[in-house]
Image (cartoon, rainbow, N blue to C red):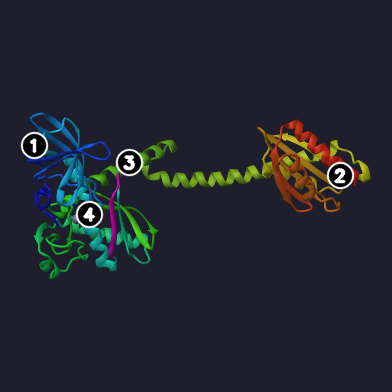
Amino acid sequence: MNTTGRLYYLDSYLLEFTARVTAFAEMDDQRFAVTLDETAFYPTGGGQPSDTGTLESSTGVARVVECIDAGSEGVLHVIEGEPPQTGARVAGRIDWPRRFEHLQQHTAQHILSQAFIKLYDAETHGFRIMERWSEIDVRLENPSAERIRQATQLANEIVWENRPVRVRLVTAEEAARMSLRKAPQREGVLRIVEIEGFDTNACGGTHARATGEVGVIFARSWERAKGMTRIEFVAGTRALKDYDIVNETAHRIAASFSVGRDEIEQSTLRLTDEHKELSRRLRALEATLIEAEAEELIRQINPGLNERRIVARIFDRRDHESLKQLAQMLIQRPQTIVLLASTDGGAARLVFARSPDIQADMNLLMREACQELNGRGGGRPDMAQGGGQANSTTLTQTLKLITERLNAN
Ligand SMILES: [Zn+2]
């Protein structure tokens, strides 16, 4: 670990500093960046996004919009605005709300990761601070809401005990004698972060001075992902923001029901029950309606050749399910063949069916009809459905063709 000039390593609360510009360069993406002989800006790394802030020199103030870790070359401060000259003295200032929010999430991760080890011997294998929440991937067997609730409960107790968080630099030999949560990934000097009496780990991030500054830790949700349990959590200021959003949403839903915030679950359940009952009644009404419709259609059509009735009808915008129900109702009458169709824009839907006392093959007739309409369809000998492209004129011609085919047999 190269600790030279990285002021944030020993003090996460150092927000203002002065430094000298060592280099100025245009990056591959046409943005400009400067390096400094020392810096308090934390660069993106270890799952934590970088700091932002300003660099002020005699030529003006530049915004630091991102910081990138360039290893032994130092930290690249990506800037917008008037760039300082190489060799110039600059006054750096870190955006505190962003730094504080990130150090709360990061310290929360140390506490939560150790809580999962203490309770379930479940190691953390990934950590990311996202836009609104953070994620940790924990090797937790049999995850459940209760197990995760117990881990966050323990983590919050550690937060509220306000334990000191200490940072020190040690050699690899010294580190080897310590019991670290995770084997260090780096060689040479290591930065050790210790939460008194709870967790010791090598880490390069920014942390709270004491656990109390984390405020609160809350697990929003969890899921199984790549053999791990992925837990979404919020801490401190983010937990407050998240609660604010959830509370506002709950109040809006409550207002739409004209009830209090805490009664929305009851109201939703009532609405779901009502919806089920209405759907049941609607289906019953549809059945009655279709029965009457079938009756009327049969009354209009006299039996034709061989005492058979062919009911051919074209409807406007009627769905497959409704066509099928009507067909099923009609073929309960003896010696009945049903050719139903519907147009919807340029699309056509077809349902052919026959009563059991007739031999005609509806599957075969449907394939023929669909070929006429450049569509697809099929089914059983007694009932088939399909679709294609047609307006009412082409559909009428197709049904006429199928009727002729039936009458020819
Ligand atoms: Zn850390």
> Which of disc 4 and disc 1 is earlier in sequence?
1
Question: Of helix, strand and loop, which one carries label 3?
Answer: helix
Question: Of helix, strand and loop, which one carries label 2?
Answer: helix
Magenta segment: 123-132
State the separation of the CA atoms marked 3 and 1.
37 Å
> Which of disc 1 and disc 2 is earlier in sequence?
1
Q: Which residue is mark 2?
A: 406
Q: Quadrant of residue 38?
A: top left
Who's the residue at 22% across and 54% down the image?
108
Residue type at mark 3 is Ile
Frontmost of labels 3 and 2 is: 2
Q: Which residue is mark 3?
A: 245
Q: Tell me residue 388's x, y (percent).
A: 69, 40
Residue type at mark 4 is Ala
Q: Which residue is mark 1?
A: 91
Frontmost of labels 1 and 4 is: 1
Cβ atoms under marks 3 and 4 closer than 8 Å: no
Closer to us: 216 or 171: 171
Residue 62 is a magenta residue: no
How crowded is the residue under tag 1: few (<14 C-alpha within 10 Å), some, or many (20+)? Answer: some
